[in-house]
Image (cartoon, grey):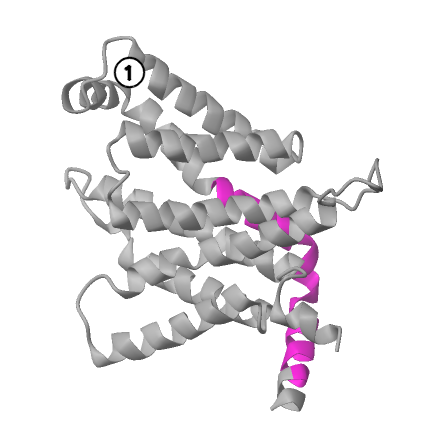
Amino acid sequence: MEVFSRKAEDILDQVGQPLKPYIPAMSRFLIIATFLEDSLRIIMQWSDQITFMEQSRHFPKGLSHLFLGLNVITMLAASFFIVVKKHQAYAIYGLMGVIVAQAFGYGLIFDMPFFLRNLSVMGGLMMVLSETMIKRKQMFAALPQISETNRRMYLQLAGRILLIFLFIGSAFHGDWSVMRIAVSLCGLAACVMVAVGFKAKWSAMFLVLFLSVLNVFVNNFWSVQHSYYKRDFLRYDFFQSLSTVGGFLLLVSTGPGGLSYDEKKKEF
C-alpha cells in the first residue's frame, strides 16, 4: 500500500508540475473571493442593506452607513493587499475582523451554518498568514520566545482544523440517502486526515475536487430567478465555499506543516 501510494504521488506530481507555480496565486484569489463578492453585493444593494440594518437590526441612522462603508473598504483594501502580497498580516486581521463584525451586525452569531462556514474561511486566512511567515533569528536568545517557524506550524495546524468545518456542517445538513452517507463518510475521513496531517496533500486535493463539484450542483445561484429570495443566500454560500476550496488548495501547495503526522513521520 505504501509503495502504491508513493507511485501515485509521483504520478500526480508529474501531472501537476506545470500548475505548481500558479497554485499559490489561484488559492489566494479563491480565498478572497467571498469578500470581493460580499463587498460588491453591499454596494449594489446599498439602499436595501441600509434599510435592513436600520429597521431589522435597529442601527441608528449614520451608524448603519458607517458600518457598511467600513466593511466594504476593509474587504476591498485587504483583498487587494493579499493578492499583491503587501501588508498581508494587517489585511488578514482586517478580514477576520469583518467576519466577526458581520456576525454580530447581521445577528448571525448563533446561526450554526453561518458560524461553521466562516470558521472555514478563517482557516483559509490562517493558511495565508502562515505562508507569509519566514524563519528569523531570535533577538534575545536567553529569553523564551516563539520563533516564526513555531508560529507558522501552529497557524498551519489551526488552519487545517478550521478548514474542515464547512464540510462537517454540510455533511449533517439536509436529507439522507445511501449515496449521501457513503460520500459523507469518505469526506469525513478526508477531513480527519487533513486535521491530523496524514497524507494531507492527498486528502486536501480530494476535498478540493469534491467541494468544487458539490458547490456547483448545490449552490447554483445562476440557475435561480433574480426575484427568488434564496438567490443571494445561494450566491453567498457559493463564494464562501470557493474561499474554503482556496484554503485547501493552499494546503496542497504549502503542505501540512511541522505539527502533522506526515512531517513527524520523516523524523523517524
Question: Measuring 48% from the left and 58% from the top, which residue is drawn there?
Answer: 161
SS at mark 1 in the image: helix
Question: Measuring 59% from the left and 45% from the top, which residue is drawn there?
Answer: 128
| 231 sits to left or right of 265 | left
For residue 127: magenta?
no
**Main SS, magenta residues:** helix
| 84 sits to left or right of 245 | right
> Can residue 79 be seen from the camera position used here?
no
Query: Toward the viewer: 27 or 99?
Result: 99
| 124 sits to left or right of 6 | left
Could you say which quadrant of the image residue 64 lies in? Answer: top left
- Quadrant where the C terminus lies? bottom right
Q: Report the label total.
A: 1
Query: Toward the viewer: 100 or 143?
Result: 143
Picture coordinates of residue 183, whole percent (x, y): 33, 75
How packed is label 1: few (under 14 Cα within 10 Å), some, or many (20 or more)? Answer: many
Picture coordinates of residue 227, whole percent (x, y): 15, 37
For residue 26: magenta?
yes
Residue pointed to by mark 1? 64
- Quadrant where the N terminus lies? bottom right
Picture coordinates of residue 51, whole percent (x, y): 19, 19
Q: Residue furthest top?
A: 62
> Can residue 212 be seen from the camera position used here?
yes
Question: Measuring 51% from the left and 52% from the top, which residue is drawn there?
Answer: 246
Amino acid type of the residue that numbered disc 1 sits on in the rendered structure: Ser
The residue stretch that appears in magenta: 6-32
Above or below: residue 23 compared with residue 45: below
Picture coordinates of residue 109, whole percent (x, y): 28, 38
